[in-house]
Amino acid sequence: MDNPFIYRAYQSKELFCDRQKELQKLIENALSGADTTLIAQRRIGKTGLIYRLFDEIKTEGIPLTPIYIDIFATRSLEDLVKVLSEAILSEFPEQTSIGKRFSKFIRSLRPMISYDPLTSAPQLQLTMQTQQEKEQTLGQLLTFLDTQDTHVLLAIDEFQQIRNYPENNVEALLRTHIQRLNNVTFLFCGSKRHLMLDIFSSERNPFYRSTEFLALDKISADAYAEFIQQKFRQADIDIDTEAVNYILDWTRRHTYFTQRLCHTVFNMAEKSVNVDFVKQAAAGILQSDTIVFNQYQQILTAGQWDFLIAVAKEGEARQITSQKFLQKYKLGNASSVNRMVKSLIEKDLLNEDTENGKPVYSLNDVFLSRWLASKY
Ligand SMILES: Nc1ncnc2c1ncn2[C@@H]1O[C@H](COP(=O)(O)OP(=O)(O)OP(=O)(O)O)[C@@H](O)[C@H]1O
Ligand SMILES: [Mg+2]
């Protein structure tokens, strides 16, 4: 039997745990034309949820045409236009009527079209010269989507990336275009909380309060326990409750890490799994990831490393600039800790959440957190 615990790309509804409420909400918003912003911690399951949503739309025949773009690797408005054109091109093959219209439109941009030899996904090179041309093309692409006889759901993953474009008007430009669309609904997704919140909830910015927020928390302990039990049972492996609880606790129910530990346990398992067996699997993961953890240390200052150790030992750290915390872990003064926090968040190593309006910090990498807490 194939391993049912995946920690790579979305595969199927059967291998996807819960998220029913979020799924319903996203469908409801898309159908009613409400744009949504999905912000959540790294590797908690944002992209997976988008794919799950697209799967649901297709299998249940929900009247929406979903298009997904990931703009993480884009560096400019021109890249954005390119990625969006390619996504439209693969959603509407040339044989379909929309596809015919789209390729006619694309041809007017004098592109070079080639196909990826491995995935046969279309790749475009557009010959846009001026900034004005690029801006126009973006508008035309969106207008194109808006005027087809289908309601489009356009999901833009890693949306905060637009903040890195050299052009500084992309937000305003997009917002202007989006406002005049009737037939396209957006799902903006990202993990850089500060940036996403600034884009969507800061009065100064064009997208200010233009979308509905959807928070993606951890999967509930009950739902995840049930899912894990069921997948083992289906493979005739008996896993006891204590072992399941240990998995959820040790990985802090952080989806990627829970999936990975389950994957490893499943691979090693024969007839039954108890808590000692899980502990062995967990130790094995930490051992094999040590090489990655050492890599982290190389890119950090000694102070940053010490700070990570402190947060790892706490699990969730609060009041990190209080005298108590600074002294307990010998971290120097508050302002240097503030600088470290900023830098570690930028490096994606540290996660900042809020609880009753106050910040709570944890390591993004649960395994690194476990490793540091046990080693130091
Ligand atoms: N509900 C779920 N059930 C089972 N596996 C899931 C679920 N959600 C996500 N996963 C798996 O967990 C891993 C991490 O999820 P995903 O890549 O969607 O997270 P993300 O929030 O988009 O991360 P990043 O911030 O790195 O983009 C993936 O392998 C995904 O398949
Ligand atoms: Mg993602």
Image (cartoon, rainbow, N blue to C red):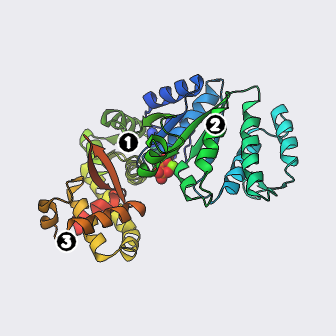
Circle 2: residue type? Ile
- Name the front one of labels 1 and 3: 3
Q: Position of residue 349 (x, y in %)?
A: 38, 61
The answer to whether the residue bearing label 2 lies less than 8 angstroms from the nearest atom of ligand 2 is no
Packing grade of label 1 (10 A; few <14, some 14-19, many >=20) is: some
Other residues around mark 2 within 10 Å, as few (<14) / some (14–19) / many (≥20): some
What residue is pinned by disc 3? 332
Disc 1 vs disc 2: which is toward the camera? 2
- Which mark sits nearer the N-terminus, 2 or 3? 2
Q: CA distance from mark 1 to mark 3?
A: 51 Å
| Vertical position of residue 280 compared to residue 53: above or below | below
Given residues 145 and 219, the one toward you in this image is 145
Q: Which residue is mark 1?
A: 237
* Callout 2 touching callout 3 (CB < 8 Å): no
Residue that appears at 30% across and 42% down: 244
Amino acid type at circle 1 is Ile
- In the figure, residue 292 lies in which quadrant? bottom left
Mark seen at residue 178 = 2
Secondary structure type for disc 2 = helix
* Kind of element beneath mark 3: loop
At x 65% / y 28%, what residue is drawn? 64
Q: Residue at x 64, y 30 (%)?
A: 58
